[in-house]
Image (tube, rainbow, N blue to C red):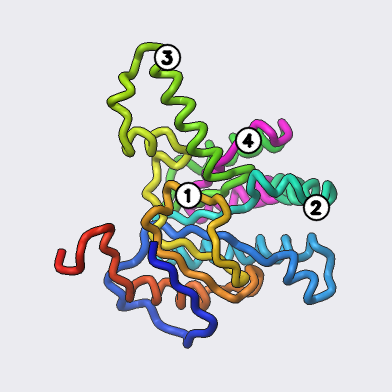
Amino acid sequence: MNIKFLKDANTSSIKNHKVMPEHVAFIPDGNNRWAKHKKLPTLAGHHKGVERVKEIVKHCLNLKINTVSFFAFSSENWQRSPDEVANLMKLFSHMLTIETKNLVKNRIRLKIIGNLEKLNKDLQQKIIHSQNITAQSFDITLIIAINYGGMWDITTAMRNIAHKITSGLLNPEAINAKMIEDNLSTKEFKAPDLLIRTSGEQRISNFMIWQCAYSELYFSNKLWPDFDSNELNLAIADYTNRERRFGMNSTK
C-alpha cells in the first residue's frame, strides 16, 4: 500500500490527468466531531454527512468514475449509544425512501454490502427494492457498506468455500486468491484504486481489508461534512501523480 497524508494542499485541476481511478472508496469519518464543534446534535452531523455523500457521488459521476463506495456503518458501530444507532437506522431507511427515484433518474445503481440479517425487516425490504429498481440502467455504482467488516467478509467467503469442500464439490488444493475474491461481497466489482479517509485518522478500520491490498491510501484532515468536491479533486490529483507498481519495479 502506498500511504499518503496531506495536511494542506492547493486546489488542482484534474481535467487533463491520464489515469483516473475506476473505483474510489471512502471512510467518511468525522460527522460526530463536526456536530460537536458546531454545538449541534449528533444526528445533525450525520444529516450533513449524507448531503456530502450525495455531492461526492454526483461529482464522481461527472468525472466518469465507475464505482464509489462508502463505509456507512461498521459491524463495530453497534457499540455506539442505542439512540445514535437507532437514529442512524432511521436515517438509512428515510434516505432509501426518498432517494431511490433520484438514483434512477441520475443513472446510479445502488449496492448494499454487509451482514444485512441484523437489520430490521422493513429496512431489509427497502434495500432489496432500491437495489432492484436501480439495477436496470446505470452509469455509476454506489456501494454502501452497512453492518460491514472486512474480517466478516473474508470469514463468510471462507465459510462458503468450506461448505463446497465438505460437500465434495471442491478440492482444497484448488483454493486460490481468485476463488476467495469470487466469494466476497464485492465479487462483481473492481477493487478500490483509491481509498480516502477523512478526519485525520490514518487506518482502514476493517474496511475492505482484502480488496484494498493494493489501493492507494489518502488521508485528509477535513471532517467528512467539510470534505467537498474540491477536496476530492485534490485527492484524485494526488492519486494520478503516483506510480502503481503492484510488486513490479518501475521499469515494467
| CA separation in Å, label 2 and label 4 | 18 Å
Position in image of residue 168 (x %, y %): 36, 12
- Residue 97 part of the magenta-drawn span: yes
Where does label 4 land, which residue?
Answer: 116
Residue 84's disc is 2
Of mark 3 and mark 4, the one earlier in the sequence is 4
- Residue for point 51% across, 64% down: 58
- Residue for point 80% across, 71% down: 36
**Residue type, mark 1 in image:** Ile
**Residue type, mark 4 in image:** Leu
Where does label 3 land, which residue?
Answer: 166
Position in image of residue 145 (x %, y %): 57, 47
Of mark 2 and mark 1, the one earlier in the sequence is 2
**Residue type, mark 3 in image:** Thr
| CA separation in Å, label 2 and label 1 | 26 Å
Dot 4: within a 10 Å radius of its alpha carbon, few (fewer than 14), some, or many (20 or more) residues?
Answer: some
The magenta segment is: 95-121
Residue 209's disc is 1
At mark 2, the secondary structure is: helix
| CA separation in Å, label 1 and label 4 | 19 Å
| CA separation in Å, label 3 and label 1 | 27 Å
User: Foreground mark, 3 or 4?
Assistant: 3
Residue 47's disc is none
Position in image of residue 206 (x %, y %): 55, 50
At mark 1, the secondary structure is: loop
User: Foreground mark, 3 or 2?
Assistant: 3
Dot 3: within a 10 Å radius of its alpha carbon, few (fewer than 14), some, or many (20 or more) residues?
Answer: few
- Residue for point 53% across, 53% down: 105
